Structures are given as structure tokens and as C-alpha cells.
Amino acid sequence: MAGLTLATATLFGSSPALAADQVVLSRGHTDAVDVHYENGSLKLKVKDDTVSPAVVRDPADVTFRVLPAAETVVPDLPAFSFLGAPGNKIWMLPQVQDPALLWPGWNTTTLGKGVFAGDKISLSLVGADGPGDVTLFDTNSLGTPSIKFRSNDGLPDRLDVPVHTHAHAGWVFSALGTYTLRFQADATLTDGTVLTTGPVDYRFVVGDLQPGGGEVSLAISGMAEGDYQPGDTVTLQAVQSPQGSLHRYQWYVKRYGQDEFAPVAGETGAAYSFTATRELNGSQYVVKLLDGETVAATSAEAWLWVAPPEEGSSTAKSVTATINPSEGALVISVDPENRAVTLPPAVLSAAGDRWESTGALKPVTVTDTRTAQPGWTVTGQVADGFRTDDGKTFAGSYLGWTPSIVEQGDQQGVIAGPVSAPYVPGRPHTGLGDNAALAAAPNGKGLGTARLDAALKLAVPTNTAPGTYTGTLTLTAI
């Protein structure tokens, strides 16, 4: 039996990375009014879940677009008379997600309990400039509306929001055009200190951005300004502005000394991740947005710089061993560069009941030189769960996997283990809190070298405390 410990890091981040790109958001989920408490100050941000992994943006860098498809009419129901006369045109981003439209909400899940008086903050709409009226409302299970903010009966409008809240409402605009909404967050610390963000401008465009809709531009975000170290993970993100209905891309690379960009096989999504190596130093990357076979937009190139190894240092070690061919051995190993797995910051599930993140285990190698071919099994377990530096924890059962076989020898007969889903109360899932099979070779099989992998899925309850959690996944071959 051989044991291996694989460290996993940043499974649940307190907040996504900060982005500084100018973007137009028109489809998908976003916490438009995202409240943060950082370094003694209260701040309003935008959590953009339209990209993966999600990023936090400054409201000044974001234009929220209400697409023409949001057009509807005021219903002929007395309860909705606050929206205007029945049959009047309105443009509404609904409380329940419509994949064809933007789905903005507000969020206080990054705020800790016991920090603010009453464990709450106040969110206010203090101003609204534009060609029409603005109303935010939600409805209960019986369809009865409750107004949260309304510009045509006087502002400011104030709403008390508990910490750890994630909420959505209907956003209604009465006319086409550009609006500036000014939101403000206020709170009192438990020691009596009063905090405020002051008014923060949010820009909404209802309808086309300009006559004819304008052309889409494409940029690459995520490339570090400085040098990467060999083995670092590089994650590039294609960013459309304005965000449109096209979602097929092609990534290209031109390595140092090459004359032409070459397509990266299989990389047709908005995000592209790879490992930095010295061979990639000086490479250029571009991404193209495709409309069928037509290129709708092409990004500027992004340059990758990888630092050279320190003078006199070495990353290689020679190991010599002798194996008695009549006995052989069963060995499980992981490339040193693959011993740390970092999952993206968790995002809210589609059902709104879990924080979720996905990633890859990274290849694990199993070599069996035993001529008797007794077979073998590889299992994994996060026995001690996950914890932050300040002691917050959650169980290893909230991490699950879907095993796969990357490579095996002819006639080796290795079979991937079953899906082990993350634990959900009331369901018979134990995730990786108990031993879960990654792969197995039956008796009479297994001789040779196989490479194993797994798609990882983290799913924790929404009341899990924010933080960066680290756990140890122990892999065992027997």
C-alpha cells in the first residue's frame, strides 16, 4: 500500500479577484450592489458572475444593459398600479432569472456576523437620473408585490439588509435611455462607529447602447503584469463589451520565434487555463469571438512572461532504484507541480441554496510492476475536512469528484471509480468525507502505468463563513 497527500487550497474565497476592465453586462447573474467591509471601510462593488471564475468590479467600470427583450407592459392588476397605467410599456429585469436578460441583485454574504449592530446594514437608493422612473420590487409566494426602491415618489428610499443576505428583485424602467442610479450603504459597528459608503453611481442603459447597437469589442483579462513562475497556473478570460448573444471563441498562441498565431486545440470557451513553463516565455495570446464561421471580434494580443530559474538552482533530482522483477511494486505518485489544487472562488448555485466551485484533481500516476497481477484500487479521502487560518471549518464530505482515466496501457483494464457527489442533507451522499474510489484494476489486470484524474466539485451550505479554506486529500493505492 502506498500513501500520498495532496494539498488543496482556496476552495472557498471570501471574494473573487478584483478586475479593472471596462465592461458592459447584459446577460447572466451579477450582484450589482455587492457590499464589502474592508480595512475599516464600507464599500460598494459589483460581483460579476457572467464570467468564470467570477470577479469583483468597481461600479465605475461597469455598464448594466437592459436589453430590448426586457420590454413588457404594466399588468392590468390593481396591486401593480405603482408601475403606471395598465398596458404602458416598461422594461423589466425580473426577480426570477431569465437567461436572455441580466439578473442583478444585492449581496451582503461577505459581511461577518457580530461586526455590525443588529447584524445588518442599510442599503439606500439616494438618487436616480434618467429619462423615466425606476422601481425595484419583489413578490411573495402569493404574487403580492413589495416595493423596495421607487424613484417617482421621492428619494432616498432605505432598506435594512441582514448580513449574509443574497437577494433579487424586479428592476423596472419606464422609458428607454441611460440612467444613473446612486446607491449608498450605511452601517454601525458594534462599538458605535458609524460607517457609510456615500453615494455610488451605477450606470444602466435601457435599450440599444447607440443607434444600430454598435459593434462588440473583445479583450483579454487575467494576464499578470509581472513574471509568472514556472508551474504557475495562467487563467485568461475573454471579455465582450457589450456582452452579446455570441458565446463561442477560439484561442490562439504565437510562441517566441514563431511567425504566425496557431489555434489552441479544444480551447473554444470564454476562459483558457494552462501551466506556465519556461518554453512559453515570450508567447502571445489572442482570442476571437465567432459567429458561426465568421469572426465577430478579435482581441489585442496578451504577452506571457515566465521568470527564469534562479542562478545555480536546480529543480531536477536523479533517483536510482532496483526492483526485483519477480516481486515488483505498486507505486502511486503525483508530479510536484500538481500537488496543490486551487479551485476558483465559490459562486451561488443556480438554485440559490449552495456555494459551489469546480476544478480538476490533476493527473495521478499509478504504476504496477507486480507480475502476479493481483489488481489494485486507488481511493481518496479528506478525513480532517477543511479549515481557514483563523479556525473556521467545514467537512470533507462537501467535496466530491467524478473520476476519469487519462491514459493506460493496452490490456491494463483500469476502470474509473463511480461519481462521489458532495454531501447534501437528506441524500445518501458522503462525498470525500469517506473513502471514495478513484479507479481500480481487477485481479489479473493492472500491470503497467495508468494516469488518473477527476473533476472536483465543492458544494457547501450558503451559511458557510467566508474565507480561504485548505484541506488534505489523501490518496491510497492498495
Image: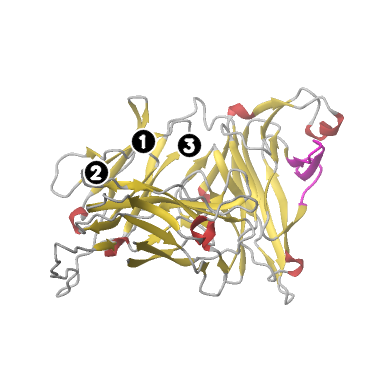
As for residue 91 lying within the magenta part, the answer is: no
Query: Residue 144 location, x and y as percent?
Result: 82, 37
Which residue range is magenta in the image?
Answer: 136-157
How far from the left and from the top, in percent, is residue 197? 65, 61
Q: CA distance from mark 2 to mark 3?
A: 25 Å
Quadrant hosting residue 436: bottom left
Query: Left or right: where does residue 457 sit relative to residue 101?
Result: left
Q: Are marks 2 and 3 in contact (CB under 8 Å)?
A: no
Q: Does 284 sit left or right of 379 as displayed? A: left
Q: Classify 368 as above or below 214.
A: below
Secondary structure under tag 1 reads strand
Q: Let me know if residue 162 appears in the view.
A: yes
Mark drawn on residue 305: none
Looking at the rendered structure, which numbered label has been put on residue 242?
3
Q: Quadrant of the C terminus?
A: bottom left
Identity of the residue drawn at 77% across and 67% down = 118
Which amino acid type is shown beneath numbered disc 2?
Val
- SS under mark 2: strand
Q: Nearer the viewer, mark 1 or mark 3?
A: 1
Structural distance between the alpha carbons of marks 1 and 3: 16 Å
Residue tagged 1 = 249
Going from N to C along the chain, the mark reached first, 2 or 3, is: 3
